[in-house]
Amino acid sequence: MTKEKLKSISLRKKMIIAFFLPTIILFVVNMMLYIGTNRVLASLDAVYASNNSLSQLSEGLANLQDATEGYLNTKTSDALEQYYINEQAYSDLLSALDDNNDKNESRVMERNIKNMSEKYLDLTNQAVESKRGGNVEKYKSIYEEAARTFQYIDSSITSLNNKQFINNSRSYGAMMGALQTLERLNIITLIIIGLANLFFIVLIASTIADPLIKLAATADTVSNGDFDVELPKVKSNDEVGVVTKAFNGMVVSIKDYIDQLTESMEATRRLRENELIMENHIKDAELKYLQSQINPHFLFNTLNAGAQLAMMEGADRTNVYIQKVADFFRYNIKKNKDVVSLQEEIELVDIYIYIINVRFAGEIQFKKEINEDLLSVQIPSMILQPIVENSINYGLRNIDWTKKILLSVYEVGDYICVSIKDNGIGMSPETIEQILDGSYTSNSKKSSNGVGLNNCIERLNIFYEREDVLDIISEGENKGTETILYLPK
């Protein structure tokens, strides 16, 4: 087949010619060699099967003898059980021996071994039964005869095993010679097929490589941004020719597209400049809005000044109230991004409850049940106060009965539990599920310090690298809500 004819054949057909025919030949030859090799290997496996059987028989006999001696020496239930297990195992091995009438010396020895073994089994059984019956003299004489029989059987098995091993070794050597011949034949066949396959590949690749090399060189030049390169000529009708033709068309189209894109980018650039000008105006307005808000530091200092003025004028309750509010803002300013102790968080809750009770005439009954030994554990700041605030705003605010909150700190296993429980309107299971998975949104306009429950849950999960730090429990409508934190020790 000439190169000109190969150029007119499709790439798929070239690949089939290069690989399909040699593969079929290789498969057929390998299958023949495989079948022959398997037959030899199967024969090799059977060569030493008789030796393996005799070795297992010898091992089973030794185990039975040991088990018999063990029971006769100890007379325990475990030793008796071990004897029966080994007796059954040896009986199973004996049943595998052929009951043949062959005059061959090895067959005759097998029959003798089987007959002696059956007698040995009977003797050991009698000895064990005599031992169980307490007949010492009888079991000793029987056991001595069984021991002699064991020696005869073991010697016969060893002799037969050696005899068969010599015969099997001769057969093994002949089979290994046949196997080596097959291996040499296999190697020679593979070399011949490999050389033929290489010849086909070189012949066909020469019709593919030249146009691909030219196409690759042109593509490399184009990838560097030079679209004025001379495009390769199409000389074949195979897939390489189709790809070359498509590549040439693509280069021309890209060149035209770049020209259009340059004009479009210039227009986009001008539009983006206008957008940036508008964004700067918006950011400037936002900055002025932020600057107009009260600075927390200024508010804290102002509250301190008010507390001093109230103290000077003798307004003690006003002084305490303003001082508590100042302490609340001080904690927010200093601890907002810190890790704090549980004790500091509870102190902030005390301040917050005091402020709320001043605002609402002491209507919140706040109680604590705290294990003081657990307050040194570290937690993210601003966790407990938002939870208490949430209980007041959404659980207690509009109820008609006495408003109560219980804060408990106790120990359960490897966790320190912090419970905040109210007797408010409670939560539905759907609302609890939404809060815990972060999908809950509220349209309520109730006041808040800006740190929501979702924010607390996210910070706890990140801090402890767990998803089950916080749980919410509510038994139903008007039965209150309990929020529990599980803090690892």
Image (tube, helix red, strand yellow):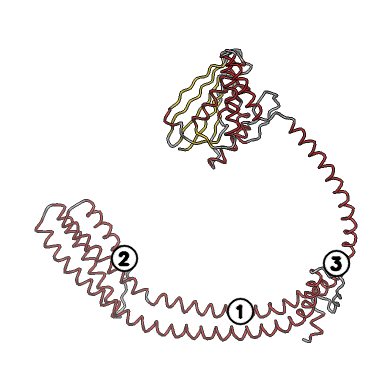
The percent position of residue 24, horizontal first and vertical second, equals 65, 78
Is residue 259 placed above or below 151 in the rendered structure? above
Q: Is residue 153 left or right of residue 347?
A: left
Residues tagged 2 and 3 counted as in contact (Cβ below 8 A): no
Q: Gap in Å between the C-alphas at discs 2 and 1?
A: 43 Å
Which badge, 2 or 1, is on the more N-terminal residue? 1
CA–CA distance in space, label 3 to label 1: 46 Å
> Which numbered disc covers residue 28?
1
For discs 3 and 1, the disc positioned in front in the rendered view:
3
Labels 3 and 1 touching (C-beta < 8 A): no
In the figure, is residue 277 to the left or right of 162? right
Picture residue at 77% right of the left edge, 76% below the top: 212
Within the image, what quadrant is residue 335 found in? top right
Q: What residue is disc 3 on?
A: 250
Q: Which secondary structure, mark 1?
A: helix
Dot placed on the residue nearer the N-terminal end, 2 or 3:
2
Cα–Cα gap, marks 2 and 3: 79 Å
Q: Is residue 477 visible?
A: no
Give the quadrant of residue 310.
top right
- SS at mark 2 in the image: helix
Residue designated by label 2: 93
The residue tagged with tag 3: helix, strand or loop? helix
Q: Is 50 drawn above or below residue 361 in the view shown?
A: below
**Label 1, residues with CA under 10 Å away: few <14, some 14-19, many ≥20:** few
Left or right of residue 23: residue 479:
left
Q: Are marks 2 and 1 in contact (CB under 8 Å)?
A: no
Where residue 400 is drawn, which disc sits there? Answer: none
* Precedes in sequence: disc 3 or disc 1: 1
Amino acid at pointer 1: Val
- Tell me which amino acid carries mark 2: Leu
